Structures are given as C-alpha cells and as structure tokens.
Amino acid sequence: MEFLQLLLSGLANGCVYGLVALGFVLIYKATEAVNFAQGDFMMLGAFVMVGLVNPQFLGLNFWLAVPLALLVMGVFGYLLDLAVLRFMFGQSQIAVVILTISLGFVIRFVAGLIWGHEPLNLHSPLAFGDLRLGDVVISFADISVIVVTVLMTLFLWQFFQRTKLGLAMQAASQNQMAAYYMGIPVKRVQGAVWALAGVVACVAGILYASKGTLDISAGFIGIKAFAAAVIGGFGSLPGALMGGLIVGVIEPFASRYLPAGYSQIAPYALLIIVLVFRPNGLFSQVRIKKV
Amino acid sequence: MSLLELENVTLKFGGVTAVNNLSMSVEEGEVFALVGPNGAGKSTVFNMISRFYRPFRGSIRFDGKDLLKQKPNQVSSQGIARTFQNIELFERATVLQNLLVGRHRHRKTMLLEEMLFIGRARAQERENRLAVEEVIDFLDLQAYRDQHIAGLPYGVRKVVELARALATKPRLLLLDEPASGLSVEETQDMRWWIEDIRRQMGITVLMVEHDMGLVGKVCDRVLALADGAELAQGTPAQVQAHPAVIEAYLGTSAISKTANAQGERV
C-alpha cells in the first residue's frame, strides 16, 4: 500500500516535470537550442492563471480562465520568438542558451513586480478534496494532474501525427532547407513551436499551482525537468514525458528508503548513470548507423 | 511564352561576380542542362530560381509571373521542385514520410479536422498516400518504403530525393547533379527516369550535370557557363563541339583556378 501511495504522488509530480521537459524538447527539436527559461515559462503560466482567477486580481471563473491563460502564454511564446529569438537566427547555440538563461531572470523579475514575492495559492477547484481507496489516499489535484497530462500527451501525439502544422514542425526541425522547398514557411513554423511551448508550459503551470503554493522561484523545477529530458533522450517527445515520470517517481522513493538528503540528489545520480551507459538517453531515436 | 525566363541576371558575392548578365529560357516540356566547370555559377543559378539568393539585377519569370516576388517557401506552390547536390532529406523519417511531406502544399484541411481525423481529412490523407504510392511505383522504391533515410545507401537517397520532388507534382523540376556519385547502372536508371518524367508526366526538367554522357542522351538543349557567363548554347552536340567550351574545360588553367576560388555555394 505504501508502495502504491509513493508511486501515485511520484507520478503526479512527474507529470509536471514531464510537461516542462516536453517544452525543452519541443524547442530543442525546432531550433536546436535549449530554452533554459522553460521552467520560468511554466512559472509565468501559473502566475497568469493566478492573475486571472484569484479574487485579489481579476477573479474570473476558473474554466473561463484556462483557455485565456493558454492563449496568453501561446501569444507570449510567439511574440518572444518574433521580437527576440528570430534575431538570433544563425548565431551560435551558446548565444541562444545564454539569452534564454537571461530571459529566465527577466521573467522572474517581472513576475515578482506584478504578482509580488509572497507565495500564493491558485484558487483552483482541483485543489481540494481527497480520494480514499483503502489505505491509499490521493488528492483530486494529483488525479487531475495525471488525467490532464494523459490528455495533453494524446493531443500532442495527434497534433504531430496528423496535422499539417505538426508535420511541418517536424520537417523544419529535421532539415530547414528541404522544408523550405516543400513549401513550409520555416520561420513562421518556428514561431508556432514557441507558441506551443508556451501553451504546454502554461498547462504545466496550472497543474503545478493546483498542487501547492506558487512563488516566483517555481521555475527552478526546470532544472529537474532538464534532467528528465536528458534521461529520456533529448529530441524524443515520449522520452521527455517518461523521463519526467521517472524523476518524479524516484524522488518519493528515495526520500522514503534512502538516508535523509539523498532524495534531492537521486534524479541527478540517475542522470549521471544514464549519461554513462546510454548517452543518447533511454528513449532516444538516435540509432547507431549501419555500416 | 517560355516556362522559365531569366533576363540579364547578375549576382555578386562581395567583389566576386558569380553570375554575370545571364539570360536563358526554358521551354515547356523540354529537358535543359546547365554545364560548365566547377564554380561556373550553375548551382548559383539554381539557388536564384529557388529564391535562396536574390539577384542584384535582372528578372526571373516563371509561367509569365515574377518569381522574385515569391518567398523561398512559396516557390513550391508555384510548381517548382528541386533536388540538391548534397542530398537534403529528412534523415530521421522513413522514405514514405519524406514523400508525404512533399504533399505539404496540397493539404487544404483545417487543424481541427486533422486533429479529429474526420471527413475531408481522411479523404485527403488517402489522396496523398495514393499520389505518393504512384511515385514509389514509378521510381521502384517499394522495397525501401518504411526504411529510415539514415540507413539507406547513397544511390537510393538520391532517388528518394527525386521522388519527394515529384510528390509535390511540379511543372518544373530542378535537378542539381542527378548523376553525381551514382554507379554506371544507377546513372542508366536515372537517364530512363528523366526521360519518363518528361514524357509520361509532362514535367519540364532543368538540370545541372557534369556527366556529358547523360547530358547528351537526355537533354534537348544545353547552356555552357564559365565564370558566371554564357559560353555557348544549343544542342548537346553543338555545345560539346564549341571551341570556347573545349577551352573552358581543357584549356587555360587560369580560368578554372579563378572559378574554383569563387566556390560553389550550397
């Protein structure tokens, strides 16, 4: 029973890591740069939601605010690409990486200015109540996190398999020149990828804020999510989600069964093990070429 | 009216004139070749037609319309497809997936229909698959349909790239060195395909090629370039016999040296 309990709470945390990791991989696939502000995107998405819903701010209905927040973050991602990142076209990867790190600082600072530095709680209808199954207790928040993540995964799967835009994104990430001459407007598609990364981050943010308190340092879970993305294999969307789940599940088990303090380093220890034995990640699509 | 018309086109890279006041026209239904020593500007001409470079001066018209007004991603919807000298495929996708991307410009459905995969989206998917299967049959790629590009031999990749260009259903096909790196048998196949592409599909072909054997067999007209300017134009036999062409290929090393210094880009 204890095992199941730990597993469930780990999975719920892991879903949030997985969604943030998904954002990393989306941007990496499309632009070959790592967006280190992805965690802060999530934090911003959560605060946008708080700003729309909480009574001290706009006080809108929760279900009305969800699509609005997603829209705001999608537009944010697109405009960020249009106004900033597109000018980095052709610059070295490291320049883009440093830019995204600094973007993270800016987002944290601006969020602090708007919403303050005190921890806040999202007034979420998901945030109260538990479900009891025998000895196992699972909160509605955790259930909804898992359900929403599953739905989001199905949505993205369908999006990348079936839609013209989703396929164009994949094509542009694999070969820009060829994509141009298949009629794909590569730059606009990359803008759409940033918009999608914003939307995914917002979903992660809403879920994160439904599970507990929110402050402007929430974006630092991006570091764990980054580890999750690497464990799963950077460049693989299902890998990112699985990596997130693995990191999420390891934490509660490590803190239960290992000496105090080890739970914090457990995800990174796993990261190192994966890098040594499977440097391309557990679910990487890169295969060794036949010669 | 010619299908493709270049008029007094000039392009410079810094101080180097890559293409100098070049005029040419390709008629509907013909196979036209650009030949010349390395660095003569052949690929540069291709890259201007596909809007990768913008000429300093001159005009390029396709089917009477100004091609220079189009963006690179709009070239394909005009009915122009191309292959590349150094094969540009989607490496982590299968042959079939690569060809289906070629159908991009023919997809007309909305995002929501596609997500739900209903009605029109289904019909369209079937239509695209059918069009792609025709190309697969035409180029004998059945055996490779579900293989990833990364594991395929060079000769097959070359054919896949040709197939992807055909999947866009172009009116004009630009082939950048279709026979380079191919074996004798593969070059022979390429020759039949180019002839069939013109005859069965009615597609006009403009190609850059060094293999004069292939050029002589499939091309109606040839334009020889050196240092970005026209040397000679005519049937393959006429061009090969032209004194200026013989000199450019075999003669004075000075010409090829300056030409090599310019380098061929992309």
Image (cartoon, coloured by chain):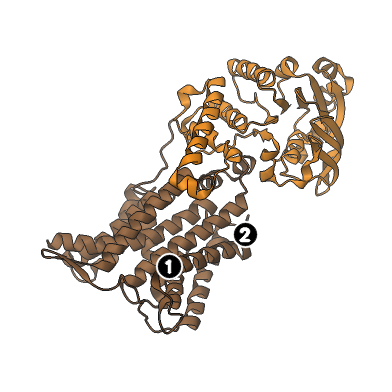
Chain colours: A brown, B orange
Q: In percent of the image, x 50 and y 83: which residue is there?
A: A113
Mark 1 secondary-structure assignment? helix
* Side (left or right) of B164 relative to B252: left
Q: In percent of the image, x 86 and y 35: which residue is there?
A: B22
* Side (left or right) of A111 relative to B65: left
x and y percent of residue B28 in the render? 77, 26
Q: Amino acid at mark 1?
A: Val
Front-most of residues A259 and B167: B167
Q: Callout 2: 10 Å neighbours few (<14), some, many (20+)?
A: some
Q: Closer to the N terminus: mark 1 or mark 2?
A: 1
Mark 2 secondary-structure assignment? helix
Q: Give how far apart the Cα atoms at labels 1 and 2 are.
A: 28 Å
Q: In percent of the image, x 53 and y 59: which residue is there?
A: A194
Q: Is residue A187 visible?
A: yes
x and y percent of residue B190 in the render? 63, 20
Subunit ID for the residue under disc 1: A
Instruction: Provide the residue designation for mark 1.
Output: A66
Above-or-below relation of B64 to A43 = above
